[in-house]
């Protein structure tokens, strides 16, 4: 969406919260959020792959605040990283401007720099909690032009793994890593702990026309909460049908569970699983292959992350090395599906 003189990427609605400065950057409209379970209504407000984008002839100032915990912000100039910030409840102003050496900003070097995905625009990439846009100084700013951003978009839905919870920076989630390798924009609808294949989210993805390929990473949350494979089957089939019937010509990739403690026969503390991870993978595979839509695909999460050392200490969430491996292999799986577009 365009706000002021900037583009807010992966933001569908700006929401005013009483007692907080600025506007909450929300990944789905409030009408969609209200259709989720209570915990999901909280998690969908958390920022991931949200970007403030603009071109500027001079300096600019973007003021942000984060509620619920500290959030991370990375500053990029086009494809190129510049610096990192941590955002808390006290509003923080991020100032952009020319940095030494002047390769990015001054002639003749500026015109010769390879710019493969993004043009010469500023990008503030945000991940973490509920991030508010407090102020955006409109000094000589403009939104990116069409040729300055990727032409194609990858939309991802899933759990905290999709959200990128255990990645140390926004650019290292498997969603961002996949999009980076394919030269695409990332639309991340990961919902930590709450990816329950809810109809409100399925309807939202189906109603969107701004993506070219999508993935559904389903769903260790449901397994962990003791939802039997039979119930998971009904929900995942309904989600696939809702999305694929609205976009029969677009690839929809269903990602089976990544390796985790569940493959060792263990349960999360104080929880009892009613099905196994193998049963969940088989349900998703069958749902994809029997969907009746030729552009629905299945990929096993164990083929995307083979090395257990790619997991973090909880034996569930991939750490940086695991996220990178998933991104590399998922991009390899998706590339042939986009052969006519890339």
Image (tube, helix red, strand yellow):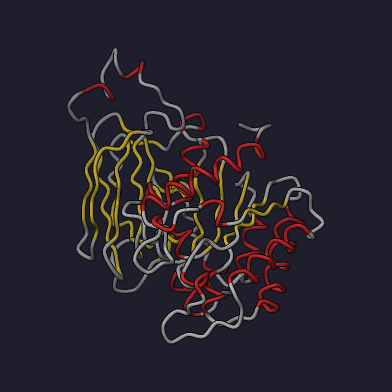
| Vertical placement of residue 93 versus 222, above or below | above
In the image, residue 54 lies at what x, y percent? Answer: 37, 38
Quarter holding residue 129: bottom left
Image position, residue 85 (x, y; %): 23, 51
Residue for point 35% across, 53% down: 126
Relative to the observer, which residue lies in front, 241 or 42?
Answer: 241
Farthest residue, direction left: 100
**What residue is drawn where x is 28% and y is 68%?**
69
Where, by quadrant of the figure, is residue 163 drawn? bottom left
- The location of residue 91, given as percent across then percent down, is 22, 59
Residue 18, quarter of the rendered image: bottom left
Q: Position of 179 compared to 169: left or right?
A: right
* Residue in front for this viewpoint, 272 or 33: 272
Instruction: Reply above or below: 6 against 315.
Output: above
Assign the C terminus to one quadrant of the image.
Answer: top right
Q: Is residue 273 above or below residue 16?
A: below
Q: Position of residue 40 (x, y in %)?
A: 49, 73
Q: Nearer the viewer, residue 48 or 322?
A: 322
Relative depth, front residue between 215 and 229? 229
Q: Looking at the image, which residue is at 45% across and 65% down? A: 160
Q: Is residue 207 left or right of residue 69?
A: right
Q: Residue furthest right?
A: 292
Q: Is residue 84 left or right of residue 131?
A: left
């Amino acid at each position: 969406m365009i706000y002021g003189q900037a583009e807010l990427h992966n933001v569908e609605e700006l929401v005013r919260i009483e007692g907080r400065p600025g506007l909450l950057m929300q990944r789905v409209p409030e009408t969609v959020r209200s259709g989720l379970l209570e915990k999901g209504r909280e998690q969908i407000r958390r920022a991931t792959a949200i970007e403030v984008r603009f071109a500027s002839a001079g300096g600019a100032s973007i003021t942000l605040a984060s509620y619920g915990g500290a959030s991370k912000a990375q500053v990029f100039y086009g494809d190129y990283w510049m610096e990192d910030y941590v955002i808390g409840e006290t509003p923080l102003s991020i100032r952009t401007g020319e940095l030494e050496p002047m390769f990015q900003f001054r002639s003749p070097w500026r015109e010769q720099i390879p710019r493969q995905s993004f043009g010469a625009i500023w990008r503030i990439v945000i991940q973490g909690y509920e991030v508010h846009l407090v102020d955006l100084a409109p000094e000589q700013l403009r939104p990116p032009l069409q040729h300055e951003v990727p032409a194609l978009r990858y939309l991802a839905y899933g759990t905290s793994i999709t959200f990128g919870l255990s990645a140390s920076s926004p650019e290292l989630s498997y969603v961002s890593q996949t999009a980076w390798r394919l030269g695409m924009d990332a639309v991340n609808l990961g919902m930590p702990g709450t990816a329950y294949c809810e109809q409100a989210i399925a309807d939202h993805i189906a109603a969107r026309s701004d993506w070219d390929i999508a993935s559904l990473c389903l769903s260790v949350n449901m397994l962990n909460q003791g939802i039997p494979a039979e119930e998971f089957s009904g929900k995942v089939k309904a989600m696939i049908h809702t999305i694929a019937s609205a976009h029969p010509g677009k690839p929809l990739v269903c990602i089976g569970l990544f390796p985790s403690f569940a493959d060792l026969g263990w349960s999360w503390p104080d929880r009892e699983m009613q099905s196994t991870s193998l049963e969940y993978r088989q349900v998703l595979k069958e749902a994809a292959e029997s969907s009746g839509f030729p552009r629905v695909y299945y990929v096993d999460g164990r083929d995307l992350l083979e090395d257990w050392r790619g997991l973090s200490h909880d034996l569930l969430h991939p750490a940086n090395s695991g996220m990178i491996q998933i991104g590399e292999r998922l991009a390899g799986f998706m590339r042939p599906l986009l052969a006519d577009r890339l």
